[in-house]
C-alpha cells in the first residue's frame, strides 16, 4: 500500500530538506493502527523522517526531524534542522515552512514510548498518546497543538495550520533516506525517447528503411566493432540481429574465453525477419583486444581502409599485409569502415589496464586522421546497476550509468554524447522492448555518425569536381 504523499509534496519537502533523497513509507495509521507502541516499532531509529497529517478539510501538515525517534523515554531531542510545515490548506496548495527557533532547538522533538510523534516543548504539534480508535474513518487525535512554543509560526495559528482541530483521516510517517547512485532520477540525465512499443516499432522501421547517402551509390554502411575480449562485441551483433529476426539468436559465437573466440574478421549481415532481406548496414566483428596481443596500427589502417578480406583469420604473429591472400589492393568506399564502435564492458572500466587504454588510444590515431566517427558502446550496464536488471528503460535515469558514461568519455577522449550505454541479450530467451529500444537507439546514432562521414566524403568529392571544372574553365 502506498502513501498519500504526492510527488509535488515530496518535491516541496525536498526543497526544504535539501539533497537528493527518497521517501519510504514507514507508518500509516489507517493500515497499522494509531498506537504509540506500533509507531515506535515502525519508526524508531530510522534517521530523518517526515510526519504528515491529512485532515477532513483537505489540509495537509506535519513535521520533519533529522533525528531518530526512539522509545528510550529520553524526552526532548536537539535538532536544529527540524521544522513544521503545511502543504495544503483546505485543498489549496499552500507550502509553508516553520523553522525551529534557534534558541529552542534542544526541544525540537519529544521521544517517549507512550507518545506518537511530538514536535516542540509545549507542545507545538503533539499528535497522540497511547492508542486512538477510528470512528467512521476519522481519528480524533488526543494530542495538542499549542503552536509557537518551539517553532517560529509567524502569523500562522492553529486555525490556519490545521483548521483548529486534530481530527485526521490519515497520519503517515516517511523515512527520508539519501539516494544512492542506483536510484533513478525523476528526469533523465540524457534526453531520450519514451520507451514504448510504438517507439520501438518506429525505430525498427527507421533502420529497415535506412540507406547510405544515395549519391555515393554504396549499398551498405560498414561499422567496425573493436574492444577487449569478452566486452560484448559478438553479443551486440547478436542483439541487433535478434531484434530484426524477431527472436533471440546467437549467430555470432559469444562467450568468455581466455583468448579471443572471434579470430575471424566477419562483416555480419542483419536480416529483416519478415522479408529475410539484408539491411543496409553491416557490423564487422574483429579480433578481441588483449593486453599483450594488440592490433598494430598498420593492421588497423588496412582494416578501416577496407583491405581486409572477409573471413580473414587473424594471426597475431603475422599481421595482415599486402601479401596476405585475398588482401584487397584497391578497396572502394563500400569496402571501407564508416564508423567505429569501441565496445567496453561497463562493469570492468574501473579495472581497465593502462596498457589497454593506450592500445585503444593508439588505434584512434588512424581513425582520427581519416575523420572516421567513433562511439563507445558501453555494455553490461545491468551488471553495474541492479535496478537495470529488471528494467533497462531506467538507463537514462540512473546516475551510476551517467557517471560511467562521463568517466569513459574522458578516458577515451570522446564527447559524452558518443558514449552509448547498452545491454545485450545474454541469457534471455525472449525479446524485451526496452533492451530493443536501447539497442536500436545505439544503432540509430551510429548510422547518423556514419552518414556524417559519408556526407563529408561526398562534400570532398564535390569540391574535387569543382576544382577540376575550374581548371577546365
Ligand atoms: N550481463 C551481461 N552480459 C553480457 C552483455 N553483453 C555480453 N555479455 C556476456 O559477456 C560475455 C562475452 O560476450 P561476447 O559477446 O562473446 O564478447 P566479445 O568477446 O566482445 O565478442 C558473454 O558471456 C555474454 O553473454 C550484457 O550487456 N550484459
Ligand atoms: Mg566475439
Image (cartoon, rainbow, N blue to C red):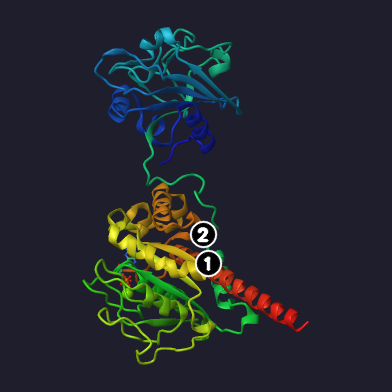
On screen, residue 261 above or below 62: below
- The residue to which callout 2 is attached is 195
Q: Position of residue 225 (x, y in %)?
A: 40, 72
Query: Taking 215 as reference, is 186 above or below it?
Result: above
Q: Please name whichever residue, 190 or 458, is drawn nearer the observer in this view of the structure.
A: 458
- x and y, in percent, of residue 190 in the image: 51, 52
Left or right: 108, with 370 as reference point: left
Q: Residues within 10 Å of mark 2 (few under 14, many from 20)?
A: some
Q: Name, please, the residue furthest toward the bottom.
A: 325
**Residue 248 visible to the viewer:** no
Q: Position of residue 338 (x, y in %)?
A: 51, 74
Separation of residues labelled 1 and 2 (CA atoms): 7 Å
Residue found 40% across the figure and 52% down from its top: 401
Identify the disc placed on residue 276. none
Q: Which label's residue is closer to the chain start, 1 or 2? A: 2
Q: Are marks 1 and 2 in contact (CB under 8 Å)?
A: yes
SS class, disc 2: loop
The residue pinned by badge 1 equals 200
Identify the element where label 1 is drawn.
helix
Does residue 258 sit above or below 393 in this rendering? below
Can I make out residue 472 in this image? yes
Q: Residue at coordinates 43% horizontally, 40% vertically from top-left? A: 2
The answer to which quarter of the image holds residue 212 is bottom right
For residue 165, above or below residue 223: above
Amino acid at each position: 500500500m502506498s502513501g498519500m504523499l504526492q510527488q509535488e509534496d515530496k518535491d516541496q519537502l525536498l526543497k526544504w530538506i535539501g539533497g537528493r533523497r527518497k521517501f519510504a513509507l514507514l507508518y500509516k495509521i489507517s493500515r497499522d493502527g494509531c498506537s504509540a507502541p506500533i509507531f515506535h516499532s515502525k519508526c524508531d531509529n530510522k534517521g530523518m523522517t517526515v510526519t504528515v497529517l491529512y485532515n477532513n478539510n483537505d489540509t495537509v501538515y506535519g513535521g520533519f526531524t533529522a533525528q531518530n525517534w526512539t522509545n528510550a523515554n529520553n524526552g526532548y531531542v536537539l535538532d536544529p534542522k527540524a521544522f513544521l510545515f503545511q502543504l495544503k490548506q483546505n485543498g489549496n496548495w499552500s507550502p509553508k515552512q516553520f523553522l525551529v527557533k534557534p534558541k529552542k532547538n534542544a526541544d525540537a522533538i519529544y521521544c517517549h514510548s507512550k507518545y506518537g510523534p511530538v514536535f516542540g516543548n509545549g507542545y507545538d504539534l503533539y499528535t497522540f498518546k497511547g492508542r486512538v480508535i477510528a470512528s467512521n474513518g476519522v481519528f480524533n487525535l488526543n494530542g495538542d497543538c499549542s503552536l509557537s512554543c518551539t517553532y517560529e509560526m509567524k502569523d500562522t495559528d492553529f486555525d490556519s495550520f490545521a483548521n483548529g482541530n486534530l481530527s485526521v483521516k490519515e497520519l503517515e510517517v516517511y523515512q527520508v533516506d539519501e539516494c544512492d547512485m542506483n536510484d533513478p532520477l525523476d528526469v533523465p540525465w540524457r534526453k531520450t525517447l519514451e520507451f514504448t512499443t510504438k517507439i520501438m516499432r518506429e525505430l525498427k522501421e527507421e533502420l529497415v528503411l535506412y540507406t547510405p547517402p544515395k549519391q555515393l551509390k554504396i549499398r551498405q554502411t560498414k561499422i567496425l566493432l573493436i574492444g577487449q575480449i569478452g566486452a560484448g562485441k559478438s553479443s551486440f551483433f547478436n542483439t541487433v540481429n535478434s531484434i530484426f529476426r524477431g527472436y533471440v539468436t546467437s549467430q555470432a559465437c559469444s562467450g568468455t574465453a581466455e583468448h579471443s573466440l572471434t579470430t575471424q574478421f566477419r562483416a555480419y549481415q542483419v536480416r529483416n525477419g519478415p522479408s529475410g532481406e539484408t539491411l543496409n548496414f553491416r557490423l564487422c566483428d574483429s579480433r578481441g583486444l588483449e593486453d599483450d596481443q594488440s592490433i598494430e596500427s598498420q593492421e588497423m589502417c588496412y582494416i578501416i581502409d577496407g583491405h581486409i578480406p572477409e573471413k580473414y583469420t587473424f594471426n597475431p604473429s603475422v599481421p595482415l599485409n599486402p601479401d596476405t591472400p585475398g588482401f584487397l589492393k584497391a578497396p572502394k568506399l563500400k569496402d571501407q569502415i564508416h564508423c567505429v564502435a569501441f565496445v567496453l564492458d561497463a562493469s570492468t572500466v574501473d579495472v581497465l589496464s593502462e596498457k589497454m587504454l593506450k592500445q585503444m588510444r593508439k588505434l584512434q590515431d588512424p581513425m582520427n586522421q581519416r575523420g572516421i566517427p567513433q562511439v563507445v558502446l558501453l555494455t553490461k550496464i545491468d551488471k553495474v546497476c541492479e535496478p537495470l536488471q529488471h528494467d533497462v528503460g531506467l538507463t537514462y535515469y540512473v546516475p551510476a550509468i551517467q557517471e560511467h558514461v562521463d568517466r569513459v568519455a574522458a578516458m577515451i577522449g570522446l564527447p559524452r554524447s558518443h558514449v552509448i550505454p547498452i545491454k545485450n541479450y545474454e541469457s534471455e530467451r525472449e525479446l524485451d522492448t526496452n533492451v530493443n529500444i536501447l539497442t536500436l537507439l545505439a544503432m540509430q546514432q551510429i548510422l547518423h555518425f556514419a552518414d556524417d562521414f559519408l556526407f563529408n566524403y561526398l562534400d570532398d568529392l564535390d569540391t574535387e569536381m569543382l576544382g577540376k571544372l575550374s581548371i577546365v574553365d
